[in-house]
Amino acid sequence: MKRQILLLVSLAALIIFLAVQAYMIQSIWKQKEEILLMRYKSLSREALSLLLAKKKQNGFEKGMEITDKFAYYLIEEELPKLDTKDDSASLGKLALKEINSILSKNEMLTPFFKSYISKYGYDNKVASILTISKLKLLTPEGNLTLIDTLYAKPAKNLIVVNTFTEEHNNFYIEFHYLIDLTHKNEMVFKEAFFTFILIIGSILIVFFVFGLTWRNLMEERRLSELKSDFINNMTHELKTPLATITVAGRTLEKDQVMNDRDKVLETAQMIGKQSVHLNQLINTILEVSFLERTEFELEKSKVMLDELIHQVVSSFLTSCDGCAIVNENYNTTGTTVSIDIVYFTTMINNLLTNAVKYCDKDPVISLTTTEDDCNFEVKITDNGVGISREHLDHVFEKFYRVPHGNIHNNKGLGLGLYYVKRIAAAHGGDVHVSSKPGQGTTFRIRIPK
């Protein structure tokens, strides 16, 4: 329950953290955007002031001269043709289009502005926009208004630099000069890139830490379940010999048994056998505790590999009354290795025992030894029930037992393969397992020469 509450609290904290980071990114973006607009507005006005101060012009002089000639053409050629208000509106559209084009093509303010901001190392990918709000033709008969509009607030990416008012021989004009930051989002991103990297990095770190925490909690939960399973299994293992010894002790108290020497001897042997089994279980628990605190202390000696393994196989078959068929194939004849005989024997015995224990038919085991320049390998293959993929990564863990239906009821503490892995590692080697359900299992032990 506490673990679940902790996970929920952690998940809620992670969601809040992500929401805060998203808000920060949005706030930083808006802040950088406002700073960018203010900077370009300031620079554009500075450039205009500098142009007026140095050259005594605003960059539209040439365009105004051409526009004045165009206005004269409108007065002389087009005005006499006007008959209705519709004709006047058409003339206004024509004048707006042509004059806007003339001023845009001939203005010098934008090139000067781009050159000016480049000196400060800023991006000069900007475009200019001209918006005419008032236009009048100055005729001998009086002023003719072609355009008279209210100027609307520009879009967010447009910067109003200045409003120009000009009056020449043939026209009067009022227009607005704007800077269009076409690549504004790209500019903002470049300026906020390092900040965003830090934020994204912090998010990734938090996710990584959360993932590790989640993984550790899940691992702790799994180990807790394994521990409970081990305790239950160990309790059952300990109760069996204790119950047998208790029953045997009570049996010896009966008169008819005490007077039967054979019965007494049989019961005493049973007590002795169960006492040995009980002692082995206790030693196993103590050994596990000891191995968790220290490393293996090997007492190596040089032995003939094939002879040692053959002795182990023969001893195993004798102890289990020929419970399996073991096909031995030695390709290491004459190879001498330096190993701890006791631990190595225990390792091979554990694998042979598992091959018999987890087989639902007559056990057939294949044992093969090979070598190369640096290592020798012992391969043990059985025809047992096999191990599914989901359990393969855990079979060498302490107390882990692979469930195999009713075969899971076989006695064991989940320590056999754990010992195999530890013994192989103590010799500087490793052990690998491959298996498929219903197709048996293969263990490969590789140990340096």
Image (spheres, rainbow, N blue to C red):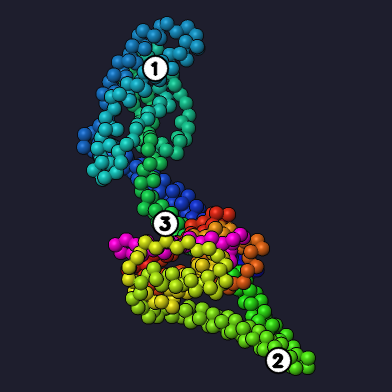
Question: Does 317 sit above or below residue 100?
Answer: below
- Other residues around mark 1 within 10 Å, as few (<14) / some (14–19) / many (≥20): many
The three-letter amino acid code for the residue at tag 3 is Gly
Question: Does 5 sit above or below residue 78?
Answer: below
**Is residue 33 located in the magenta-colored stretch of the structure?**
no
**Is residue 374 located in the magenta-colored stretch of the structure?**
yes
Residue, disc 3:
201
> Alpha-carbon distance for marks 3 and 2?
82 Å
Q: Is 260 or 81 nearer to us in this picture?
A: 260
Kindly tell me whether residue 391 is visible in this rendering.
no
Numbered circle sitting on residue 261: 2
Which range is magenta?
Answer: 357-380
Kindly tell me whether residue 358 is visible in this rendering.
yes
The three-letter amino acid code for the residue at tag 1 is Ala
Left or right position of 437 against 434? right
Q: Is 264 or 188 nearer to us in this picture?
A: 264
Residue, disc 1:
95
Secondary structure under the numbered disc 2 in the rendered image:
helix
